[in-house]
Image (tube, rainbow, N blue to C red):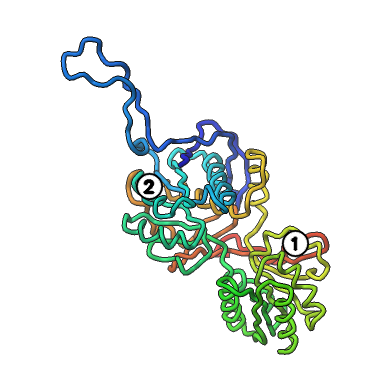
């Protein structure tokens, strides 16, 4: 369990949406044990009453803090996802330092050792808001336990099915990414769409999102094929597309790395002139522009402009590259600090504020939670070029734009 609050001295740096200032600070990550040692001093040499034992008194739990909000960060700090969890935790520390807040204290709990144990420990320590977990399966465990204590959960998952009943989803949503890029393609005159989606939950969600988005945009889906990422399966799926009908645009609903494998097969089997479309997963693949067959492809994602600055700060402090999801931890702290201005320490977190009509702004741009508890994001559309990608349709700065 790791506890973090803002250091007293910090340097500042400037940059944020709408000209807002983000503060840069140097500081240290404070470690808190699960017990607090309170020195009592030696016992009197000639006691007149019962003799008290000498030495420190052990007090269970975290120290009482009546001036700051206790917020729990529940992420994997061990196991296969420890790198992502540590990156998110480090980003929350940077956010605390940058805002120089004295109202929020964040304690980190490891979900890899058991999601139920982590949330129960967080609640017993008096935390009134939970940031995390990372995984949808953990959110399904944590959500009901936290709800019984009237503690909201802001998860970094992108699985809409776990949202609701006090659980809010901050993760990047493929539905929104697909809706955005399909809408842009329709504006550019493309009308017939096809899709290649991987077998599994993500592919199923992406396929359904494409069908809805194309219908709403007034286009037509001519074929949707699934594959299991093996070369033979990819080739078979592409040939089925070729047999079905011609198409103007093809969605490859998988990572950028898979798209690099799929695109050459598509170009040789009926999709030579089709506009290739991608999802938010493409944003994490830095080698897209190396492939000539992906040039001209479009994908929708959160903006990277401010994330690049966060990444630079992160490298300088932690001497390693952050995971892209680290910005979710940073923005969750910005959201918390904003609401904390009118949140009385020790009182329940005002969850209704999460649905502020104007939304919130952070490293990943503007976002707001809808009635279902899912973060709606302002996304940009990027185009893969020669050696680099470029933004061809900028994300709105707010939901009023």
Pick the residue in front: 67 or 228: 228
Q: Residue 109's x, y, as percent?
A: 45, 47
Pick the residue in front: 135 or 18: 135
- How crowded is the residue under tag 1: few (<14 C-alpha within 10 Å), some, or many (20+)? few
Whether residue 113 sits left or right of residue 189 in the image: it is left
Q: Residue 97's x, y, as percent?
A: 54, 39
Q: Residue furthest top?
A: 46
Give the number of callouts. 2
Q: Residue at x 59, y 57 (%)?
A: 365
Q: Residue 254's x, y, as percent?
A: 66, 69
Image quarter hosting the N terminus:
top left
Which mark, by number, is residue 121? 2
Q: Residue 336's x, y, as percent?
A: 46, 49
Query: In terms of secondary structure, where does tag 2 sit?
Result: helix
Mark yes or no: residue 330 visible.
Answer: no
Mark yes or no: residue 141 visible.
Answer: yes
Q: Residue furthest left?
A: 49
In this picture, is 173 found above or below 79?
below
Identify residue for label 1. 390
Pick the residue in front: 202 or 68: 202
Whether residue 325 sits left or right of residue 162 in the image: it is right
Pick the residue in front: 356 or 294: 294
In this picture, is 62 found above or below 276?
above
In this picture, is 121 found above or below 186?
above
Image quarter hosting the C terminus:
bottom right
Going from N to C along the chain, the mark reached first, 1 or 2, is: 2
What is the quadrant of residue 298 in the picture? bottom right
* Disc 1 to disc 2: CB gap under 8 Å: no
């Amino acid at each position: 369990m790791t506890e973090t609050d803002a250091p007293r001295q910090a340097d500042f740096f400037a940059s944020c949406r709408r000209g807002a200032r983000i503060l840069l600070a140097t500081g240290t990550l404070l470690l808190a044990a699960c017990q607090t040692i309170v020195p009592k001093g030696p016992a009197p040499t000639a006691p007149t009453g019962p003799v008290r034992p000498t030495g420190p008194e052990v007090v269970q739990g975290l120290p009482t803090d009546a001036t700051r909000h206790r917020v729990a960060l529940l992420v994997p700090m061990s196991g296969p996802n420890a790198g992502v969890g540590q990156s998110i935790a480090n980003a929350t520390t940077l956010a605390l330092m940058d805002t120089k807040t004295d109202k929020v204290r964040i304690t980190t709990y490891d979900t890899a050792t058991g999601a139920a144990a982590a949330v129960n420990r967080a609640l017993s320590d008096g935390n009134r808001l939970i940031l995390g977990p990372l995984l949808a399966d953990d959110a399904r465990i944590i959500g009901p336990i936290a709800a019984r204590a009237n503690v909201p959960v802001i998860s970094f998952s992108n699985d809409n099915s776990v949202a609701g009943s006090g659980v809010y989803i901050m993760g990047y949503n493929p539905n929104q990414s697909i809706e955005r890029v399909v809408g842009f393609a329709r504006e550019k005159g493309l009308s017939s769409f096809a899709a290649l989606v991987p077998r599994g939950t993500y592919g199923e969600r992406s396929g359904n999102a494409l069908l809805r988005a194309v219908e709403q945009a007034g286009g037509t889906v001519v074929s949707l094929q699934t594959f299991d990422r093996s070369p033979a399966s990819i080739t078979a799926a592409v040939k089925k597309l070729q047999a079905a009908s011609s198409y103007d645009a093809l969605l490859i609903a998988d990572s950028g790395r898979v798209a690099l494998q799929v695109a050459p097969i598509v170009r040789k089997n009926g999709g030579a002139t089709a506009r290739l479309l991608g999802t938010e997963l493409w944003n994490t693949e830095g080698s897209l522009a190396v492939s000539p067959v992906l040039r001209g492809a479009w994908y929708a994602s959160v903006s990277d402009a401010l994330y690049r600055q966060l990444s630079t700060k992160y490298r300088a402090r932690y001497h390693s590259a952050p995971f892209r999801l680290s910005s979710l931890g940073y923005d969750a702290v910005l959201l918390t600090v904003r609401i904390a201005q009118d949140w009385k320490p020790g009182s329940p977190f005002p969850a209704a504020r999460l649905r502020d009509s104007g939304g919130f702004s952070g490293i990943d741009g503007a976002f707001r939670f809808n009635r279902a508890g899912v973060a709606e994001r302002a996304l940009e559309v990027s185009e893969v070029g020669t050696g680099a990608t470029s933004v061809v349709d900028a994300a709105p700065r707010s939901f009023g734009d």
